[in-house]
Amino acid sequence: MKKSNLLVLCCHGVYDNGDFYADRPIEKDIYLKHIEQAFMLLQKKKYDVLIISGGYTKPQVEKSEARGYLDWAKEEKRLGLYWQKMDVILEECARTSAENYLYSICRFYQYYGNFPLKVGSITLGWKKSWHEKVIGPALSKEIAVELIEGEWEKLKEINPSFGLIKDNNGDLAKACEQVLKNNSGEKLDPFEAKKNIEDRDIWKKGHPYQNINNDFIEFFDKLKEHVDFMRSGDHSEDDIQENITKLAKHYPWCK
């Protein structure tokens, strides 16, 4: 049967033999819930395929976030047997949220020879608006973030000093809007060209997706032009959006 519904599990750190290397390791229990939810949704057949996405981002260990999450799932008794019976694929190159989706769509095509019709994701709930309202449209794909019940309350409990919590009096809706506001102006670019994301590829792995076929070669060449444009100086939001609109015409799934 043709696969068409993709669930992307966006990783937030590298798990390795019980250690968890992340920007906020205190949130480890929340990320385990992400893994559990991903497998549950796949088991319930809401999605055909789970792609665990995350690159080699941490200097402590030469291991991808995606590989670490799968190892973590294998260690959990209630998950360890499930993954072998499901379509679970690793995407081990992504450095940003946008790349979690972009590279997962590329990986999906590598495996199945077609593009997903439906794309859902599991990530931190406060990123929902940013992913659905900015990254999705920029990629010409509708993205549906699957929220984890009780996650925001758990985050407030374990990490009350987290800026989004303090600055918004613990209100999730306000936190989501703040994320959008924080990513205004030049940061409205979902590809985060000005953030030196190369630094997040600690182990210099790169990615293989440009070489899938000629359509991907053309797209990634255009993406490099977009990155060069963003780094060439300060640009208005209108100019950024115009450039992203031009880029979207070259997505292999839009042809």
Image (spheres, helix red, strand yellow):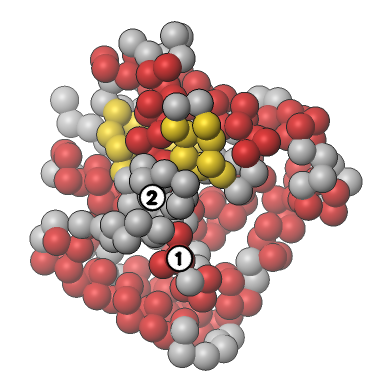
**Residue 182 appears in the picture as rendered:** yes
Mark 1: which amino acid? Asp
State the residue at coordinates (88%, 46%): 169
Q: Is disc 1 placed on a helix, strand or loop?
A: helix
111 is higher (above) or lower (below) than 189:
above
Q: Residue furthest left?
A: 213
Q: Which residue is mark 1?
A: 199
**Residue 8 appears in the picture as rendered:** no
Give the image location of residue 237, x and y in percent. 58, 80
Tell me where residue 243 sits by quadrant. Answer: bottom left
Tell me where residue 224 sits by quadrant. Answer: bottom left
Mark 2: which amino acid? Tyr
Tell me where residue 177 sits by quadrant. Answer: bottom right
| Quadrant position of the N terminus in the picture | top left
State the residue at coordinates (52%, 71%): 195
Q: Is residue 165 left or right of residue 87?
A: right
Give the spatial CA distance, label 1 vs label 2.
Answer: 11 Å
Give the image location of residue 203, x and y in percent. 35, 56
Q: Which residue is mark 2?
A: 56
Q: Nearer the viewer, residue 96 or 131?
A: 96
Q: Is residue 178 left or right of residue 115?
A: right
Q: Residues within 10 Å of mark 2 (few under 14, many from 20)?
A: many
Q: Nearer the viewer, residue 106 or 11?
A: 11
Q: Is disc 2 placed on a helix, strand or loop?
A: loop
105 is higher (above) or lower (below) than 247:
above
State the residue at coordinates (58%, 72%): 187
